[in-house]
Image (spheres, rainbow, N blue to C red):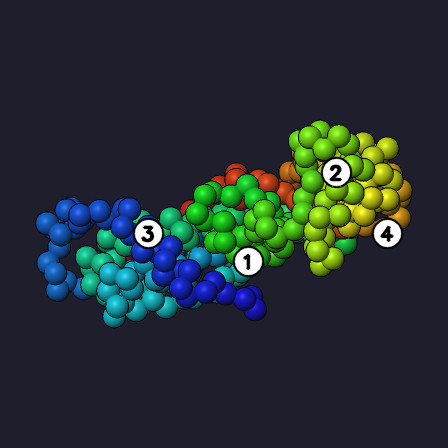
């Protein structure tokens, strides 16, 4: 990948996670292992997938042992086979044991997101549709989870409510309709801000476009209706499909001609990729 997590963000996330997990101390490890004991091991994928979160895993180990050696065998965004070594680590045994769960929590969770994203991306190969994430992220982990989506070959939707205007169904009800909602927002924002408006019926499209929408969120439409919506829009706005998207449906949705497919399950339902730390004998 040509992008990486900022080191400060990595350090802050790891510091919070270690403080949460270790608390007043790792009483098991400290009672069992001598302070100067050293060992080495490997992070091993138990199943095939796409890796993400190596910098976080490395930072977790090094936070407890600055001299820890962390040697990745792959890079974020790489596919790995089952039983593949992801990285090798060596250093103080206490640090390896105490940081193990935090390192693996980040690595398995983000790799799970990257893996599920890659499956969706592969499923729409040959279409023009981009797979993007949503704001359905775990509190405090949004930037990390959206990074994992990028590692899996997907793209990012907005990071927060301040990124862009997105008029949803309850906004429309509160404003009195699609046209009124878009027109009012357009009158109150700067010229650099784009407007996305949700529509769940074909008869709302022209009203949204006439009022100045730049992106139409085509919500919970079946592939045939999506194709008709794309035809009606005729290139006047970006068409984003949302709702009822899964690995079983995403290819058909992409075939409708939409530009973007937003998939909440990439972050809210991705299963962790099984990766473990195995000490050398």
Q: Which mark is residue 16?
A: 3
Q: Nearer the viewer, residue 78 or 174?
A: 174
- Write the residue at 45% across / 43% down: 139
Tell me residue 9's x, y (percent). Answer: 42, 60
The quarter of the displayed image where residue 210 is located: top right
- Determine whether, in the image, residue 67 is placed left or right of residue 29: right
Specify the label residue 235 is tagged with.
Answer: 4
Q: Which residue is mark 1?
A: 151
Residues at badges 1 and 4 in contact (C-beta under 8 Å)? Answer: no
Question: Comparing marks 3 and 2, which lies closer to the viewer?
Answer: 2
Q: Earlier in the sequence, mark 1 or mark 3?
A: 3
Which residue is at 85% across, 51% downward? 236
Sooner in the amino-acid sequence: mark 3 or mark 2: 3
Relative to residue 224, is residue 153 drawn left or right? Answer: left
Which of label 4 and label 2 is nearer to you? 2
- Tell me whether the residue at label 3 lies in contact with that at label 4, contact meaning CB atoms closer than 8 angstroms: no
Q: Position of residue 99 (x, y in %)?
A: 28, 54
Q: CA distance from mark 3 to mark 4?
A: 46 Å
Camera-nearest label, 1 or 4: 4
The tag earlier along the polypeptide, 1 or 4, is: 1
Q: Which residue is mark 2?
A: 181
């Amino acid at each position: 990948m040509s992008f990486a997590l900022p080191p400060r963000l990595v350090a802050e996330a790891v510091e919070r996670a270690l403080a949460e997990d270790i608390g007043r101390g790792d009483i098991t490890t400290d009672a069992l292992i001598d302070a100067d004991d050293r060992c080495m091991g490997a992070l091993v994928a138990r199943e095939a997938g796409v890796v993400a979160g190596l910098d976080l895993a490395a930072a977790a180990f090094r936070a407890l042992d600055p001299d820890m050696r962390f040697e990745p065998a792959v890079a974020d965004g790489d596919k790995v086979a089952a039983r593949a070594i992801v990285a090798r680590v060596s250093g103080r045994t206490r640090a390896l044991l105490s940081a193990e769960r935090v390192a693996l929590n980040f690595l398995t969770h983000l790799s799970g997101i990257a893996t599920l994203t890659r499956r969706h991306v592969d499923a729409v190969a040959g279409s023009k549709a981009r797979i993007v994430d949503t704001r359905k992220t775990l509190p405090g982990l949004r930037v990390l989870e959206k990074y994992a989506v990028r590692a899996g070959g997907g793209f990012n939707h907005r990071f927060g409510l301040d990124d862009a205007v997105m008029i949803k169904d309850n906004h429309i009800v509160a404003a009195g309709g699609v046209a009124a909602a878009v027109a009012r927002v357009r009158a109150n924002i700067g010229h650099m801000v784009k407007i996305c408006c949700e529509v769940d019926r074909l008869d709302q499209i022209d009203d949204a476009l006439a009022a100045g929408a730049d992106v139409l969120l085509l919500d919970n439409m079946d592939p045939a209706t999506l194709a008709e919506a794309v035809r009606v829009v005729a290139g006047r706005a970006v068409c984003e499909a949302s709702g009822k998207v899964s690995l079983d449906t995403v290819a058909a949705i992409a075939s409708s001609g939409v530009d973007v497919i937003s998939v909440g399950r990439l972050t809210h339902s991705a299963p962790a990729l099984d990766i473990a730390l195995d000490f050398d004998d």
